[in-house]
Amino acid sequence: MTSDNHYDTVEQPEEQTQSAQRRSEKAPPLRPPSFLGSPAVKFVIIGVLTVMLLVPSLFVWVLVEERADRARDVAQDIARSWGGVQQINGPYLVVPFSETYTVSTDDSSKTEMRWHTAILFPEKLDVGGDISVQERRKSIYSLPVYHGSVNLKGRFAATSPETFEPQFGGQIDIAADKAVLVVGIGDIAALKSEVGLVLNGNGSVPFEPGLGPLTMDPMRRSVASMSPSGINAPVAAGLWRNGFSFDIPIQMNGSKAFYVAPAGQTTTVSLQSDWPHPGFTGAFLPETRDIGDTGFTASWTIPYLARGIPRSVLGAQMPLQDKALGVEFVEPVNFYHTIARSLKYAVCFISLTFLAVFILEMRSRSRVHWIQYGLVGLSLIVFYVMLLALAEHVGYGPAYLLAAAAATLLNTIYIGTALKSRLAGGVMLMVLAAIFGVLYALMQEQDYALLIGSLLAFLSLAVTMFATQRIDWSGRQQTGARGQAEPA
């Protein structure tokens, strides 16, 4: 009995030992913790990926600029056939006169004659304009063009002899029969009817092409017109010496903008149009304006002192070329500029998306490879390409909705599948919807873009800090816990 019991007690440990050996042979060996698998290293890799995605975003920006240049070229083609930016400068009464004076030297003296040009401003000028705007298309591009009915009314005061003062102390000889009334026009080729000068309400004197004795300096023009020129009409000596009223109706085409120079000693401008998106610009802003869905009305009053130029000047240059006022016919959304501006926020929104995926990964049993992070980032880059392509056909608003919906749906399904969690997919859907919503708001509110962006960055950082507060960045605790659980 004793020997049998001893045999039994010895045999049992040997069986347990052999059974343990067999289990150890079947179980896979424990692997050391992976360096690339630690959360800290993955976080750094995600940051490097974010910076690397700057390269494809730069290529997208170049593509946007290329398409914008193409759109500008097409717009110039439309403007050349319809009419460019129009600027009305004048009317001015131009009277040439000569001065004869004596030049003395040590040995002799001689008589010289020099010609001067006096430019007289109207005592009062009233400009009225009714501008009808439409969009002209060529291929997939469009340009706001307009037809304007403009009327220039006013009066020139009687001319005093002090206007023609000698510059070198000589004798003055006024070429009274060579006086002309000059009106500068931005694109004279876009005039749609003959222009006549009505003097004192009687008859009509036809205008001739050209600025007469005046010239325009391209470097001083406030508006870059395509073919800056003007028209002129003769004025009899008896009229301009005693003063006269004038009425000049003009029918013209144009595009993009319309400008008027405050040529009168007192100038009033009244414009109305059916374009609901005006951009008032120039040296003077309107005193009153009314903008609605059916168009706008605006009026300016520029007094003599505000203009800053005397009643008459001497010279051969068209005056007031840098003091024009007017309105630009702004397109509701210049999507090329908007998309280019949104690309500046690309890294920020890619980072926010990566942070959302990273937090979801740390709270899940599944893992997302860094290659998958890169694919998510590339899908956001493709979003910009889709936005550009769709906006050229359906407009910025619908294009943004379609491109954002496609990118959101793709990444929601992809992350939900990768983490094997519908909840993670739902969270990703909300995060991406919020990101694209904020991006759209940033593009619409230029004045508050910095404020919104800074608040968003602070909120995202705060959420990330608290959401990752309990993460084991080294990954050792999780490895240790798995190692302790294996033998059990």
Image: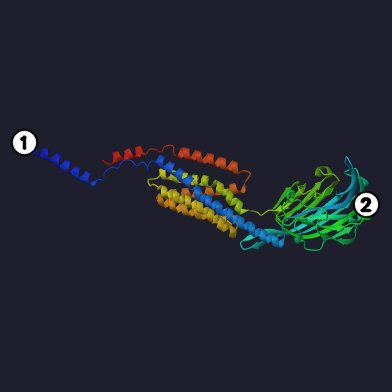
Image quarter where the C terminus lies is top left
Mark found first going from the N terminus, 2 or 1: 1
- Where does label 2 land, which residue? 241
Percent across and percent down for residue 93 are 86, 52
**Secondary structure of residue under mark 2:** helix
The secondary element bearing badge 1 is classed as helix
x and y, in percent, of residue 442 in the image: 59, 46
Which residue is at the front of the view, 198 or 177?
Answer: 177
Percent of width and height locating residue 397: 59, 55
Q: How much space separates mark 2 and mark 1, taking CA atoms?
A: 151 Å
- The crowding category of the residue bearing disc 2, from other C-alpha atoms within 10 Å (few below 14, some 14 to 19, many at least 20), is some
Nearest the viewer among 62 and 345 is 62
Q: Which residue is mark 1?
A: 2
Residue 231 visible at all: yes
Say which amino acid is labelled 1: Thr
Image position of 177 (left or right of 451): right
Q: Nearer the viewer, mark 2 or mark 1?
A: 2
Q: Amino acid at mark 2?
A: Arg
Farthest residue, direction front:
107
Q: Nearer the viewer, residue 451 or 96?
A: 96
Q: Nearer the viewer, residue 336 or 355?
A: 336
In the picture, measured across the screen, residue 45 lies left or right of residue 449, that is: left
Horizontal arrangement in the rendering, residue 359 relative to residue 149 (left or right): left
302 in relation to 386, above or below? above
Tell me: residue 470, above or below residue 195. Answer: above
Residue at left offset 15%, top offset 39% = 13
Q: Quarter of the image containing the N terminus?
A: top left
Can the viewer see residue 425? no
Instruction: Say if mark 2 contacts mark 1, CB within 8 Å.
Output: no
